[in-house]
């Protein structure tokens, strides 16, 4: 294997035309008045009190919220397996595969994780993924994630993988999927974590390349549940992939898409109307468009929100500015997830804890987030009811 000395040198594998400066910095959210107009105080209060005569937040003191967060069963719905590559494993795999990293230590790698926007992260993330060569590497990566997830009481995962990140550098589709699925299967048997696998298309690449990837995936159709859309959002609207998603649905795949992370609300509309997705990944910019909020509420289309990611990639300046609480109060089916935890400073438990503290979420908020995740998952109705009953038990 030839050395890859440019890893982490800051150079991009994308042509400059694929990069766009962020022209739509996210506002903290609409003024309260616009939310109040649509989802006024009485409606929010009604929602809270409909949950029971003694709301959980009145029964569970803030000291016990940490315990509640630790013990509730969780479903993770927005997790890029390549984004779980911890610097320690990156060093080990580089050594194992004879790849030269431009950084000498784990600390050096961590120091490079100072992102200014999504693209600045993606450049480093794709470079890091190049240490993944053999089936065993994909297995080890996935297994390490599952062990961490188990320690956060994650019971169900729906994970993304990006085949093009690997097939474009000569790694076969089967190497990638055999390694990931081998670990997922062992995770179900040994850790009791159920799973679904979601194949993402890289939106900075062409629709033709996505279509080819879709065709290549058909040999593994039984192992892939859904397709998604990720990578550089600005300048690559969902509409670019309408034919690919039409074909994917005709092959029986469910669909999701990243939209409204950095991109405008219109990209969320396109994902809903043109790609006909079951869920929106991120979607936090929806609050800029009241009609879109109404649509998400009416259809209960879930958002897979990733609080620590949004701060690391400067979608919000601080966690205190995050709009998760406003999404919940608006009646949106929001969930908490970790996105690329090795790069963003925390797995799902840490996301719950940090966002609870930053936004002063109460027990009912935490329980709603946990229930929403199972409701939004691709599990059967029976499994959803089973997990929801476990959450109800954990509340007492
Ligand atoms: N790929 C990995 N993480 C991503 C994110 N947060 N947004 C878009 N593409 C990604
Ligand atoms: Zn993501």
Image: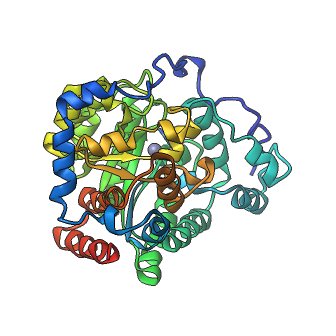
Residue 209 in picture, x, y percent from top left: 41, 35
Residue 293 in picture, x, y percent from top left: 23, 33
Residue 53 visible in rendering: yes
Q: Nearer the viewer, residue 265 or 131?
A: 265
Residue 256 in picture, x, y percent from top left: 30, 45
- Is 52 situated above or below 8? below
Which quadrant of the structure image shows residue 224? bottom left
Residue lying at 19% horizontally and 35% vertically, measured from the top left = 40
- Is 122 situated above or below 152? above
* Horizontal side of residue 276 vs 307, given as left or right: left
* Horizontal side of residue 33 vs 49, given as left or right: right
Colouring: rainbow
User: Tag count in the figure?
Assistant: 0
Which quadrant of the structure image shows residue 275? top left
- Is 299 situated above or below 140? above
Q: Residue furthest bottom?
A: 190
Residue 287 in picture, x, y percent from top left: 31, 30
Residue 2 visible in rendering: no
Which quadrant of the structure image shows residue 118? top right
* Horizontal side of residue 88 vs 73, given as left or right: right
Residue lying at 53% horizontally and 46% vertically, measured from the top left = 308
Q: Quadrant of the C terminus?
A: bottom left
Q: Residue furthest right?
A: 104
Q: Nearer the viewer, residue 121 or 212?
A: 121
Q: Nearer the viewer, residue 204 or 40?
A: 40
């Amino acid at each position: 294997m030839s050395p890859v000395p440019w890893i982490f040198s800051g150079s991009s594998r994308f042509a400059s035309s694929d990069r766009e400066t962020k022209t739509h910095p996210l506002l903290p959210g609409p003024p309260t008045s616009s939310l109040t107009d649509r989802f006024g105080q009485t409606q929010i209060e009604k929602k809270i009190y409909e949950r029971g005569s003694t709301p959980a937040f009145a029964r569970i003191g803030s000291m016990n919220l940490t315990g509640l967060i630790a013990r509730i069963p969780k479903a993770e719905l927005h997790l890029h397996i390549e984004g779980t590559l911890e610097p320690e494993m990156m060093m080990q795999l580089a050594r194992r595969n004879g790849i030269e990293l431009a950084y000498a230590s784990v600390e050096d790698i961590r120091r490079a994780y100072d992102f200014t926007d999504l693209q600045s992260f993606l450049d480093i993330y794709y470079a890091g993924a190049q240490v993944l060569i053999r089936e065993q590497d994909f297995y080890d990566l996935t297994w390490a994630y599952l062990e961490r997830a188990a320690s956060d009481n994650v019971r169900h995962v729906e994970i993304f993988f990006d085949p093009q990140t690997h097939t474009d550098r000569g790694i076969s589709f089967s190497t990638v999927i055999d390694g990931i699925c081998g670990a997922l299967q062992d995770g179900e048997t040994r850790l009791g974590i159920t799973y679904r696998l979601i194949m993402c298309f890289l939106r900075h690449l062409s629709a033709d390349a996505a279509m080819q990837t879709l065709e290549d995936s058909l040999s593994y159709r039984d192992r892939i549940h859904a397709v998604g859309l990720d990578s550089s959002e600005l300048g690559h609207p969902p509409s670019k992939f309408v034919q690919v998603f039409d074909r994917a649905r005709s092959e029986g795949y469910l669909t999701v898409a990243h939209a409204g992370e950095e991109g405008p609300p219109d990209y969320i509309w396109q994902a809903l109307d043109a790609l006909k997705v079951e869920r929106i990944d991120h979607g936090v910019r929806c609050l800029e468009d009241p009609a879109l909020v109404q649509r998400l509420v009416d259809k209960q289309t879930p958002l897979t929100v990733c609080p620590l990611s949004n701060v690391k990639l400067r979608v919000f300046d601080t966690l205190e500015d995050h709009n998760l609480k406003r999404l919940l109060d608006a009646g949106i089916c929001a969930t908490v997830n970790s996105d690329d935890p090795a790069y963003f400073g925390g797995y799902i438990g840490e996301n719950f804890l940090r966002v609870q503290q930053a936004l002063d979420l109460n027990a009912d908020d935490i329980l709603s987030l946990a229930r929403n995740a199972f409701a939004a998952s691709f599990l059967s109705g029976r499994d959803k009811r089973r997990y929801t009953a476990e959450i109800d038990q954990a509340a007492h």
